[in-house]
Image (cartoon, coloured by chain):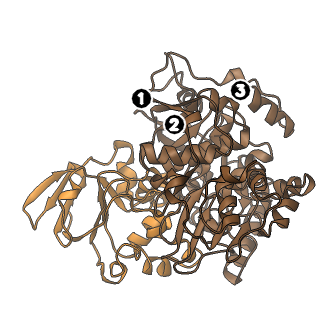
Chain colours: A brown, B orange
């Protein structure tokens, strides 16, 4: 029976020859990732109550990113508990304060095409960029997985999203995803799989593919996925992972897809999503002149090296406007080191950027850099819900690193292409 | 039929940041619950009663995987959430934590304050105030035992004991 890529991965994890959408299956989990907020802090008491142990410590990855670095006694205690639990349970793959889990996980070579993986965070679909089926779960469900090594799934249908053509200069994956949120809505993914295909996707670097799959969460999909290709193989090899054959995990051409949405990349303008929903996205023109207090470059969605470089392109030789502040929280320590070595950080700093630690930071209102009442922020993050980044009345506009950098320079929302020549 | 509860009605796309605001996430559930849905209705957390029912619009609980979202509702005494559709992770979290989440396409007919009684096994929602009955999707077969046990942890406790 012809199968989509997601169906093939699920069938393999369920020890079945094939699966059909709508079936309930139990899958063995290849990898379970958790962070400091939903991880040990929440699952420790459940495991103790059950008198159970971790099913396979080698399949668990813990990455502290939500409360790093500690800003008060409570966050310090959460991190302390995380470290002690990881040590006590023999979790060798524990990355403490190394960056945001969705970026650190592939950076350390843990993702390979065909894996069935879960993450204790809603942006876990990011792993789909590596040809994995990876989805987010809550802490109690994670505790169940950590005890049993398995979870259930209603086999999702696959929705194909086909982007052809070339993105114009100053337009990137973040704009693509904001536009998709507006077109399909926050439940357009209907807890199915969205698979990104087309020559535009094939041309995207891995970090941009991660942004695509990351925001499958904002489409309400169970996950996003991009089939592995030579770029995936080269990327994994560069990170020191075992060689992969990208042809091994591909969907069948004649598989059944729920629908295919087609888009023209060349027609896409930079996008801005006014609060309180990513689905409010419109071309930047519609919000030109909106004054901002803070420009934030951060999060798994928008602070990878590729994102910092986009911002640097706009900021080079310019200064952050008086009355505005630009805060940058690179997605990982390694990305920070690379950005320091290749001059990207110097460009950001020369422009007046204030560097924050690598972590989830202000994105979810957990860390440093949060907003005051009525402040206006433009951000590279994925969500602009009420109260998301601090005070409830703060206004969050979502945009690409190019557009956020342009707003930092102008003190108001502007088309980044004005600053790119 | 379960005991009737008062309906609290919310709109489409209620997100997890409204259910469990990020700035309180490191605090105990008691405190998170005090701020549950305050952005949508500042009186909700202080006035909702034991056995009350939250009625949402489309895509209720979209966003984060934080299970403090359904946990806060449960802590406040809410016995069930009815909505035409749910955020996928919220739905799983709710059932795992023993909060009934029922897909009810006609949830929009319920008005704030209506007395609602549920028959989840039979897929029925009784609006006692309006004398109407709405269909809801039954709890998926493979989860009925989990729901009956009161969530994933008591379910696993039973499974491990037997």
The residue tagged 1 is: A258
Q: Where is residue A404 in the image (x, y as percent from the top left)?
A: 65, 59
**Marks 2/3 same chain:** yes
Q: Earlier in the sequence, mark 2 or mark 3?
A: 2
Gap between marks 2 and 3 measured at Cα: 18 Å
- The image quadrant that residue A226 belongs to is top right
Identify residue for label 3. A229
Identify the subunit bearing mark 1. A
Counting residues from the start of the chain, the first of labels 1 and 2 encountered is 2
- Circle on res. A194: 2
Query: Does residue B7 lie above or below B150 as drawn?
Result: below
Residue at mark 3 to residue at mark 1: CA–CA distance = 23 Å
Name the image quarter holding residue A197: top right
Marks 2,3: beta carbons within 8 A: no
Q: Residues within 10 Å of mark 1 (few under 14, many from 20)?
A: few
- The location of residue A193, given as percent across then percent down, is 50, 37
């Amino acid at each position: 029976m012809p199968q989509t890529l997601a169906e093939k991965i699920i069938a393999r994890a369920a020890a079945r020859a094939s699966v059909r959408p709508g079936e309930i299956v139990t899958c063995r989990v290849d990898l379970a990732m958790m962070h400091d907020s939903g991880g040990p802090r929440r699952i420790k008491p459940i495991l103790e109550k059950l008198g159970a142990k971790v099913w396979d410590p080698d399949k668990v990855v813990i990455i502290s990113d939500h409360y790093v670095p500690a800003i008060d006694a409570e966050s310090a205690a959460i991190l302390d508990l995380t470290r002690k639990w990881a040590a006590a349970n023999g979790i060798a793959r524990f990355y403490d304060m190394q960056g945001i889990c969705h970026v650190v996980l592939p950076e350390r070579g843990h993702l390979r095409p065909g894996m069935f993986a879960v993450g204790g965070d809603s942006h876990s679909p990011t792993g789909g960029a590596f040809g994995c089926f990876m989805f987010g779960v809550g802490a109690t469900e994670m505790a169940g997985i950590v005890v049993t090594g398995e979870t259930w799934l209603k086999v999702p249908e696959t929705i194909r999203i086909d982007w052809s053509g070339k993105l114009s200069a100053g337009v990137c994956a973040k704009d693509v995803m904001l536009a998709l949120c507006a077109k399909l809505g926050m439940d357009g993914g209907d807890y199915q799989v969205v698979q990104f295909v087309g020559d535009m996707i094939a041309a995207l670097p891995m970090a941009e593919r991660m942004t695509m799959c990351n925001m499958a969460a904002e489409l309400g999909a169970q996950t996003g996925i991009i089939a592995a290709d030579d770029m995936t193989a080269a990327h994994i090899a560069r990170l020191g992972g075992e060689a992969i054959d990208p042809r091994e995990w591909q969907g069948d051409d004649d598989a059944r897809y729920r629908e295919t949405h087609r888009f023209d990349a060349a027609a896409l303008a930079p996008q801005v999503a006014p609060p309180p929903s990513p689905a409010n996205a419109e071309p930047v023109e519609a919000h030109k002149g909106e004054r901002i207090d803070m420009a934030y470059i951060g999060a798994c969605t928008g602070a990878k090296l590729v994102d910092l470089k986009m911002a640097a392109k706009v900021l080079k030789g310019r200064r952050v406007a008086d009355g505005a502040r630009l805060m940058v929280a690179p997605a990982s320590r390694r990305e920070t080191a690379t950005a320091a070595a290749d001059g990207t950080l110097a460009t950001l700093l020369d422009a007046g950027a204030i560097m924050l630690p690598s972590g989830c930071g202000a994105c979810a209102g957990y860390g440093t850099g949060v907003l005051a009442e009525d402040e206006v922020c433009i951000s590279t993050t994925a969500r602009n819900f009420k109260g998301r980044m601090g005070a409830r009345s703060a206004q969050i506009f979502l945009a690409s690193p190019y557009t956020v950098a342009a707003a930092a320079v102008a003190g108001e929302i502007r088309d980044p292409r004005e600053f790119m020549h | 039929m379960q005991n009737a509860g008062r309906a609290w009605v919310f709109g489409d796309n209620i997100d997890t940041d409204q259910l469990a605001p990020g700035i309180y996430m490191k605090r105990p559930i008691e405190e998170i619950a005090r701020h549950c849905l305050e952005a949508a209705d500042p009186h909700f957390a202080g006035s909702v009663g034991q056995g009350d029912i939250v009625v949402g619009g489309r895509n209720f609980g979209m966003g984060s995987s934080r299970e403090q979202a359904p946990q806060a509702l449960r802590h406040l005494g809410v016995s069930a959430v009815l909505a035409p559709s749910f955020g996928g992770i919220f739905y799983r979290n709710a059932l795992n934590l023993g909060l009934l989440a029922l897909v009810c396409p006609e949830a929009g007919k319920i008005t704030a304050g209506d007395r609602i009684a549920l028959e989840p096994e039979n897929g029925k929602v009784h609006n006692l105030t309006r004398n109407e009955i709405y269909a809801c999707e039954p709890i998926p077969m493979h989860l009925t035992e989990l729901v009956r046990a009161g969530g994933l942890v008591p379910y696993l406790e039973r499974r491990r004991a037997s």
